[in-house]
Image (cartoon, rainbow, N blue to C red):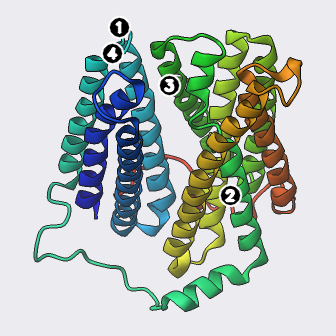
Amino acid sequence: FIWTGTMLQYGGLAILPFSLLILSGTGEGPVIFGQLGAGLAFLLIGAGLHTTQTAGLALASDLARPEARPRMVALLFVMLLVGMFVSALLFGWLLTDFGPMTLIRVIQSAAVITLCLNVIALWKQEPRGQPRKREESRHTNFREAISELSAEPQSRRLLVAVGLGTGGFTMQDILLEPFGGQVLGLSVSATTMLTAMLAGGMLLAFAMSAKQLARGLNPNRLAAYGALLGIIAFALIGFVSAVKLTSLFTFGVILIGIGGGLFAMGTLTATMAMASEHNRGLALGAWGAVQATATGIAIALGGALRDFVSGLAAAGALGPGLSGPATGYAFVYHLEWVLLFTTLVVIGPLAAFSRRQDTDSKKRFGLAEFPS
């Protein structure tokens, strides 16, 4: 599965730059070919990413001791953020002198590096003919497991909060960079740095959450703090649409990273704590499925709403005061803080207590010891 996902992502990254060149008018061919190619490329990249990520997390869960699994998830999450941060810095530097050939080289280099890293990660993980030893566990079929997981009202409420909060944080995913370029006049290199700021904020959030969760803070309350920071962040960025202050926009992006990191770590820890030992894998999968589904819907909805509202603004349907290109972006940003406020309402009952009932050091969250 990891190899198949790697090849899917490699294929998407190989197609992507040429599709973008056709869309920009600097390549040869009808625009429809660029649209179809870009759609196929993003589909392959997304499918490859989530196939590799899900199978890798399952493999790591099988290899890690039960008490080390939260730390294992933390380690994988940190490496994901470090990769985002370093690659964003590198892309920003490489794209300083932007050009079509530079774009092709950078994206295809990313494809090759991804392939090499995943081959190294796979090396001798599962030798042929030598199946991994599995822990003795109570056998439960899928229907029984999902029924047990959904029987708890708290589990259902948590998953609803995960969906709403993830949607609130990720609706801006494809809008921040074009907003910086179209509304604030930032260069390609400067807009690429936004990803580094976002990842840096999430890394800071991880350090904060690891410390607070180790002290016994209710992970649902941690997630609520993240949603609250997200409300402030998107309100600030919505304000930037009117005042066009780059410094305020940068601060808002960092706040989005911190809030999103706190929310993700809090809900993931809460999901693992709610599930029983034999059901933990399913609970983790449910968290990932809800998050991935909400992310996909939110990104598509965010882009569509931006285009729709911007079209109304350009046609003058919203009045002369809202005729600029920032109107569509501002609508989505304000909708995001509304979603995050709804998330606070949903997760509030779960965050009623400031301390977890079980503060056993083996169940604390952090990187006190690396997974075996």
Rendered location of residue 63, percent (x, y) = 33, 65
> In the image, which is nearer the foreground, mark 3 or mark 1?
1
Q: Secondary structure at mark 1?
A: loop
Disc 3 versus disc 1: distance between alpha carbons? 19 Å
| CB-based contact (under 8 Å), mark 3 and mark 4 | no
Q: How many other residues sit within 10 Å of disc 3, few (<14), some (14-19) or many (≥20)?
A: many
3 or 1: tag closer to the N-terminus: 1
Q: Name the kind of residue labelled 2 in the image.
A: Val
For this view, does 141 lie left or right of residue 198?
left
Q: Which residue is mark 3?
A: 196
> In the image, which is nearer the foreground, mark 2 or mark 1?
1
2 or 3: tag closer to the N-terminus: 2
| CB-based contact (under 8 Å), mark 2 and mark 1 | no
For this view, does 137 lie left or right of residue 362?
left
| CB-based contact (under 8 Å), mark 2 and mark 3 | no
Q: Name the kind of residue labelled 4 in the image.
A: Leu
Q: Secondary structure at mark 4?
A: helix
Q: Name the kind of residue labelled 1 in the image.
A: Asp
Rendered location of residue 177, percent (x, y) = 56, 25
**Vertical side of 139 occupied by 88: above or below:** above
Q: How many other residues sit within 10 Å of disc 1, few (<14), some (14-19) or many (≥20)?
A: few
> In the image, which is nearer the foreground, mark 3 or mark 4?
4
Disc 4 versus disc 2: distance between alpha carbons? 36 Å
Say which mark, if any, is on residue 94.
4
Q: Viewer-proximal residue, 149 or 204? A: 149
Q: Which residue is mark 2?
A: 162
3 or 4: tag closer to the N-terminus: 4
Q: Viewer-proximal residue, 19 or 187? A: 19
Q: Which residue is mark 1?
A: 97
